[in-house]
Amino acid sequence: MCLAIPAKVCEILKNNRIIVDITGVRREADTSLLEETLEIEDYVLVHTGFVISKLDKKQAEEDLKLWDEILQA
């Protein structure tokens, strides 16, 4: 089973690449599947290293809160 994880955009790189923060861990992700423009502080959904959608800030923050609770259990 694979999961898509909410992440916060930290840095915009070249060639459809960004740096995202996923629960405190920074990773590089590919944005080539996304048609929308991203900015730093946006929230995205990342699946296997690819950004698959841009998220609403409020919903993303709620989802991340749930992830924190799951990881602490």
Image (tube, rainbow, N blue to C red):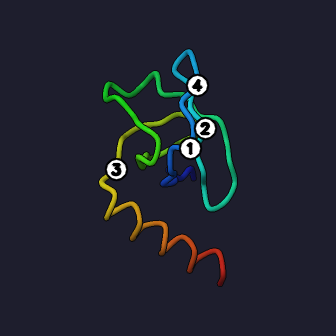
Up the image or down, 4 lies above or below 36; here it is below
Mark 1 surroundings within 10 Å by alpha-carbon count, few (fewer than 14), some (14 through 19), many (20 or more): some
Mark 2 surroundings within 10 Å by alpha-carbon count, few (fewer than 14), some (14 through 19), many (20 or more): some
Q: Amino acid at mark 1?
A: Cys
Mark 4 surroundings within 10 Å by alpha-carbon count, few (fewer than 14), some (14 through 19), many (20 or more): few
Helix or strand or loop: what does disc 4 sit on? Answer: loop
The residue carrying mark 4 is 13
Residue 35 screen position, x and y as percent: 32, 24
Q: Earlier in the sequence, mark 2 or mark 1?
A: 1
Query: Marks 4 and 1: CB-CB under 8 Å?
Result: no
In the picture, the disc for residue 55 is 3
The residue carrying mark 2 is 19
Query: Marks 2 and 1: CB-CB under 8 Å?
Result: yes
Q: Nearer the viewer, residue 48 or 22?
A: 22
Q: Amino acid at mark 2?
A: Ile
The nearer-to-camera label among 3 and 2 is 2
Helix or strand or loop: what does disc 2 sit on? Answer: strand
Mark 3 surroundings within 10 Å by alpha-carbon count, few (fewer than 14), some (14 through 19), many (20 or more): some
Q: Nearer the viewer, residue 39 or 4?
A: 39
The residue carrying mark 1 is 10
Q: State the CA–CA distance, disc 2 to disc 1.
A: 5 Å
Q: State the CA–CA distance, disc 1 to disc 3.
A: 15 Å
Quadrant (top left/top right/bottom left/bottom right) for the C terminus: bottom right
Q: Residue at x 42, y 49 (%)?
A: 43
Which quarter of the picture shows residue 36?
top left
Q: State the CA–CA distance, disc 4 to disc 2.
A: 7 Å
